[in-house]
Image (cartoon, rainbow, N blue to C red):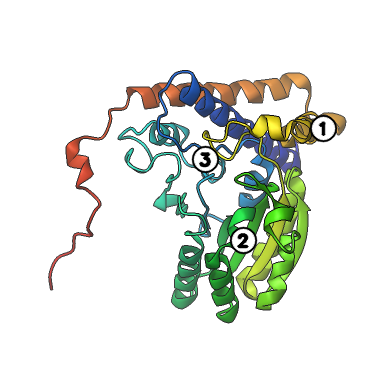
């Protein structure tokens, strides 16, 4: 029987493979099969170790919020694969009833608050969630994912400043993939080591972590969550890499960063790094890992079939969830 540690690593491997398979399917459904439509589709491919490692450090009662590159984080939080795919395809059985799409996956039952389309727009919301936990005396931490580009947004300054003033139980996790839309971090940030911004708010920083190493991400996030739960907000920065352009409208990413992209795919891929670790330690063999991969591939295949069979929202759905219905006193 594998130890608890080995089971954990194998579970993370499965989660990362699931995310990669899901994103590959979304890419295909957009470009080839035209079942995902629109002009916005931001894939998490390459970031898998950040989402999986960080979320494994949380409890079910803790809260998670992110921006528009949200598919991988949603799956790592345990959202239903079929419901996520149905949302991608704009179907009524989606996580947001087919009305949110790629950028607005959410599940209140798992304290996963989304997916938000406005750059940095979710940061004040994260503060509000953490403030509610503190006000109610609940033992909850809010983990907020932030893209490197959003760190230059006014929302970032205001939100981190408020979190520090009120000692809110928050972990701010910057996913630095070095390119904000199409601009390199050293060209859009006066201080490209983004974790250092914590000093401006009197906030604790745990520095940088290799975002391609799921174990390293988990370990540092676990430290951050423990600190936030007892003492207040923490900022940390994960260095990662995305394999696709900013979104589907970015069609020159592979050419502009071809050499660097090839390097990451060949020697720094988060799934391959964990696979190598498992094989070298004798925790798994190619056959057992292949079985895990086959299971995740089947899950995605079933999710696509589920989504395709789900109806589109009707006109009646358009008027639902617009107002909160309450009884007058």
Q: Secondary structure at mark 3?
A: helix
Depicted 89 relative to depicted 217: above or below: above
Mark 1 or 3 closer to N-term?
3
Residue drawn at the location 17% of the way across and 40% of the way down: 316
Closer to the eye: label 2 or 1: 2
> Crowding near pointer 1: few (<14 within 10 Å), some, many (20+)?
few
Of all residues shown, which one is farthest toward the bottom? 165
Which circle's residue, 3 or 2, is located before the other in the chain?
3
User: Quick one: label 3, few (<14), some, or many (20+) residues within 10 Å?
Assistant: many
- Between 129 and 177, the residue placed more toward the observer is 177
Mark nearer the N terminus (2 vs 1): 2
Q: Is residue 266 left or right of residue 294?
A: right
Q: Residue at left 65%, top 25%?
A: 292
Q: Residue furthest right?
A: 280
- Quarter of the image for residue 276 reads top right
Q: Position of residue 285 (x, y in %)?
A: 79, 23
The answer to whether the residues at label 2 and label 1 have Cβ atoms under 8 Å apart is no
**Residue carrying label 1:** 267
| 136 relative to 70 in the view: left or right | left
Q: Residues within 10 Å of mark 2 (few under 14, many from 20)?
A: many
- Quadrant of the rendered structure where residue 206 is? bottom right
Residue designated by label 2: 151
Identify the residue position indicated by label 3 in the image: 71
Mark 1 and mark 3 in contact? Answer it, CB < 8 Å.
no
Q: Is residue 313 visible?
A: yes
Pinpoint residue 234: horizontal percent, then vertical percent. 66, 68
Q: Secondary structure at mark 2?
A: helix
Left/right placement of residue 158 relative to residue 220 reads left
Above or below 174: residue 272 = above
């Amino acid at each position: 029987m594998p130890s608890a540690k080995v089971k954990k690593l194998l579970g993370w491997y499965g989660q990362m493979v699931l995310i990669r398979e899901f994103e590959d399917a979304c890419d295909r459904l957009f470009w080839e099969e035209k079942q995902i439509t629109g002009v916005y589709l931001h894939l998490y491919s390459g970031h898998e170790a950040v989402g999986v490692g960080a979320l494994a450090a949380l409890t079910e009662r803790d809260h998670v919020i992110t921006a528009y590159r949200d598919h991988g984080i949603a799956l790592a939080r345990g959202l239903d694969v079929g419901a996520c795919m149905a949302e991608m395809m704009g179907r009524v059985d989606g996580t947001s009833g087919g009305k949110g799409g790629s950028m607005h996956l959410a599940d209140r039952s798992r304290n996963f608050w989304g997916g938000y389309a406005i750059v940095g727009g979710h940061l004040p919301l994260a503060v509000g969630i953490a403030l509610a936990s503190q006000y109610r005396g609940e033992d909850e931490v809010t983990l907020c994912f932030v893209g490197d580009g959003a760190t230059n947004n006014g929302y970032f300054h205001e939100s981190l400043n408020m979190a520090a003033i009120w000692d809110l139980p928050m972990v701010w996790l910057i996913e630095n993939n070095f390119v904000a839309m199409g601009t390199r971090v050293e060209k859009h940030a006066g201080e490209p080591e983004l974790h250092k911004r914590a000093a401006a708010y009197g906030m604790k920083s745990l520095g940088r972590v290799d975002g391609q190493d799921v174990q390293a991400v988990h370990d540092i996030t676990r430290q951050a969550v423990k600190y936030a739960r007892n003492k207040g907000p923490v900022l940390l920065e994960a260095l990662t890499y995305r394999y696709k352009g900013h979104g589907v409208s970015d069609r020159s990413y592979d050419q502009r960063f071809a050499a660097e992209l090839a390097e990451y795919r060949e020697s720094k891929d988060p799934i391959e790094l964990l696979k190598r670790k498992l094989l070298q330690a004798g925790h798994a063999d190619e056959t057992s890992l292949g079985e895990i991969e086959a299971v995740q591939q089947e899950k995605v295949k079933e999710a696509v079939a589920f989504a395709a069979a789900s109806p589109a929202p009707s006109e009646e759905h358009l008027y639902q969830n617009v107002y909160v219905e309450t009884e007058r006193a």
